[in-house]
Amino acid sequence: MELTQEKALIEAILYLESEPVDERRLSTVSGLSREVVRRVLAALEEDYAGEHRGIELTRLEDGVGLAPKRALWEHLKDHYGKRRDARLSKAALETLSIVAYAQPITRGEIENLRGVSADNMIRLLLQRGLIKETGRKDAPGKPVQYGTTREFLKQFHLQSIAELPRLDEVEEDRFRLDG
């Protein structure tokens, strides 16, 4: 079964959606069964795998979307990588990396690792949608804990937090909160 029209329909939906879409929503919008949607996604993934294609099917947590191929991103990021605001400062990137590697983490724990106040950086990262409140720590005062968001994964072209580069032993010790 070629699924030609079904592939065209799912491709159009993915193009029109600004955020990754789960299979259930694709099924609802397209009117296709979830099994057909799964087969179509597999076929599209195969279609986009060729070097002659500039986009690929990306999976982000439970959603699927279209994005430029990773190999092309180096050529595109200067023009298209600048999202809403200017690039993140070194301090903001340091705070974001601490959250990414040590999540869930509190403001106090971030400050302990950075050695300086983190209020402004946390506020900036929250405004940009790169981190979010994930709950409260079971400790005196019940401090808010932070973690990364889907927007973080999208901006750094990661499918999941597990794709973050591995830390060496020295870096791992730095992010350890119990010591």
Image (cartoon, helix red, strand yellow):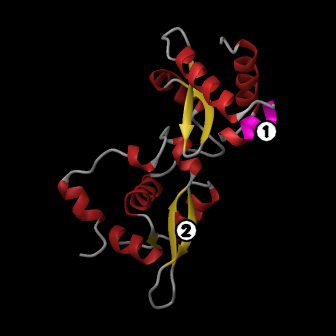
**Most frequent secondary structure within the magenta stretch:** helix
Helix, strand or loop under label 1: helix
- Residue 123 location (% of width, % of height): 58, 66
52 falls in the magenta region = no
Judged by depth in the image, the label closer to the viewer, 1 or 2, is 1
Tag 1: amino acid: Thr
Residue 133 spot, x, y in % from top left: 57, 68
Looking at the image, residue 22 sits to the left or right of residue 102; the answer is: right
Residue 26 in magenta stretch: yes
On the rendered image, what quadrant is the C terminus found in? bottom left
User: Which residue is found at the position 39% from the left and 74% from the top?
Assistant: 109
In the displayed structure, 104 sits above or below 80; it is: below
Q: Whole-percent x and y of residue 103?
A: 43, 64
Q: Residues within 10 Å of mark 1 (few under 14, many from 20)?
A: few
Residue carrying label 1: 28
The answer, for residue 19, to whether it is visible in the render is no
In this view, the residue in front, 116 or 113, is 113
Q: CA distance from mark 1 to mark 2?
A: 30 Å
Q: How many marks?
A: 2
The magenta segment: 25-30
User: In this orientation, which residue lies closer to the viewer: 32 or 51?
Assistant: 32
Identify the residue at horizontal 46%, vertical 74% (top origin). 106
Left or right: residue 91 versus residue 60 is: left
> Residue 15's x, y, as percent?
72, 27
Image mark for residue 134 = 2
Residue 134 in sight in this render: yes
At label 2, the amino acid type is Thr
